[in-house]
Image: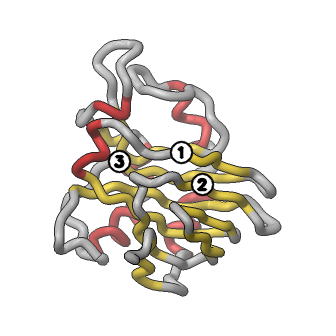
Amino acid sequence: MSSNFRFISFNEDTSAILKELDDNPKDWQEVSSFENIGGLKDPYGFLPLIMAVVEQEGDNPKNTEILKPTPMFERHPAAINWLKSKGFTSIARCAFFKLKIGGKVGKHIDDGTYYLTKDRYHFSLRGRYMYECGDEQHIIEPGTFFWFDNKKYHQAINVGDEDRLTFVFDVPHSPNNP
């Protein structure tokens, strides 16, 4: 049986990325001013660096390949530099996500045509959370970098004593990806 997870590294240094997030707290509200985006306009804990763009209201962002760097992209170079240090040369959607203490991201599958050619990764920055994918569960600690099969049901539960903060990103599928 193959694993739904691939743990790439543990105990990564998160300090440079966290410093930029801590230095730019208003970035968490900026998404509410964006036009032509799919999804919630004012979600808790969503800070996109590169996001999906929909051409018409009502279009499904899960089916668009149109991507746009946000203004926050320029204010968070540490995350992009970290990605480059891991050998990623082409980056699709990427964003920071917060999850409140005891909060839960319900079970879901990342469906839609966009996801058919992408690999999804998480880099845990702060907090402790339980991540489930398929029939596997793992406790994720800060500094953990991993891939998971987002085409299977997955969910997250913040089991720590502070907001969970993670960097989630997609890259084009390649056998050379970690």
Q: Residue at x 24, y 68 (%)?
A: 88
Q: Which type of secondary structure does the marked residue at label 3 adopt?
A: loop
Q: How is the image coloured?
A: secondary structure
Mark identifier at residue 108? 1
The first of marks 1 and 3 along the sequence is 3
- Dot 3, crowdedness within 10 Å: few (<14), some or many (≥20)? many
Mark identifier at residue 47? none
How much space separates mark 1 and mark 3, taking CA atoms?
A: 18 Å
The answer to whether residue 72 is above or below residue 168 is above
The amino acid type of the residue labelled 2 equals Gln
The amino acid type of the residue labelled 3 equals Arg
167 to the left or right of 137: left
Residue 121 pos. (x, y %) = 41, 63
Q: Residue at x 67, y 61 (%)?
A: 164
Q: Residue at x 56, y 28 (%)?
A: 40
168 to the left or right of 107: left
How much space separates mark 2 and mark 1, taking CA atoms?
A: 7 Å
Q: Which residue is mark 2?
A: 155
Say if mark 2 contacts mark 1, CB within 8 Å: yes
Q: Quadrant of residue 138?
A: bottom right
The amino acid type of the residue labelled 1 equals His
Q: Which type of secondary structure does the marked residue at label 2 adopt?
A: strand
Residue 91 pos. (x, y %) = 27, 56
114 to the left or right of 62: left
Q: Which residue is mark 3?
A: 93
Q: Which type of secondary structure does the marked residue at label 1 adopt?
A: strand
The answer to whether residue 143 is above or below residue 124 is below
